Image: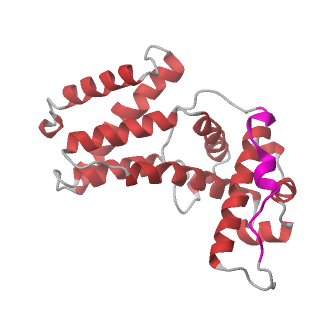
Amino acid sequence: MFLFVPRRRWHAPADDFDHTSQARHPPSAQPQGGRPTQDVAAHLGEHILETAFAEFVAFGVDGVSMERVAVAAKVSKRTLYGRFKSKNGLVLATTNHGLAKLAKPIADGEPQGSVRKKILYVTRCILDVSLTEYVLGLETLIEWIVDNGLHKDADASPLGYDAGVKMLEAILTEVVEDPEERAFMARHVYDALVTIPRMRILRLGDLSDTPECKGRYAERTLSLLSHGIPFLAE
């Protein structure tokens, strides 16, 4: 969903993630055997990805093997490799799953109203979620993907920056016809309202992580941008 400015190499202690609740209760297989239904297969895939996420974050990607994930998820190695082919594939799938899980509620909750109102909503939601412990854990996977060059070969960007920008582009279609200009503007607005304040909160410490401070920052930033982009004015 979103590309985040790395704060630090962060690994949660193992106790911060509840491996057992997921590992002990994988989705039930078909009672008569045979191929599972699509619903069961989808839930099994999600179960594996959630388990893999917990393992990767708690112990580091390099410290987790496919065998370890299979044991934690209570599935066979054959099932795991059949779905994800390799550990690299599992890391990419786990990251994309986490980003998609964050993106859906934001997209579904987009309000009616002006372009300014929609942009404020989307960017504020992205900023808020980017500051959560879940995302700080997800960020370690993104860093590993970049460090190992996997983002260059992925079919869809696992970094998520493009997904956040695409949300803004969709909003801007109401007022900007030219696709190139719309894409440039979306990236500029995203950086101004998400990338920069997140860096200031996590790395510089000169912006407080409170609703009031983030709200004032967003309003003032949009007001400043509105001098060059009039439809961003109130």
Residue at position x 40%, y 34% from top?
Answer: 194
Magenta-colored stretch includes residue 17: yes
Q: Nearer the viewer, residue 133 or 7?
A: 133
Residues shaded magenta: 13-29
On screen, residue 201 above or below 55: above
On screen, residue 117 above or below 110: above
Residue at position x 58%, y 39% from top?
Answer: 135
Residue at position x 40%, y 25% from top?
Answer: 211
Position of residue 119 in the picture relative to residue 145 (left or right): left
The way the protein has been coloured in the rendering is secondary structure
Res 225 quadrant in image = top left
Position of residue 197 in the picture relative to residue 117 (left or right): right
> Residue 193, how many percent across, how many down?
35, 32
> Residue 21, how many percent across, how many down?
77, 50
Res 218 quadrant in image = top left
On screen, residue 179 above or below 84: above
Magenta-colored stretch includes residue 161: no
Residue 162 in view here: no
> Residue 14, how many percent across, how many down?
80, 36
On screen, residue 127 above or below 167: above
> Residue 25, how many percent across, how many down?
79, 59
Residue at position x 83%, y 43% from top?
Answer: 63
Q: How many marks?
A: 0
Q: Nearer the viewer, residue 229 or 115?
A: 115
Position of residue 79 in the picture relative to residue 90 (left or right): right
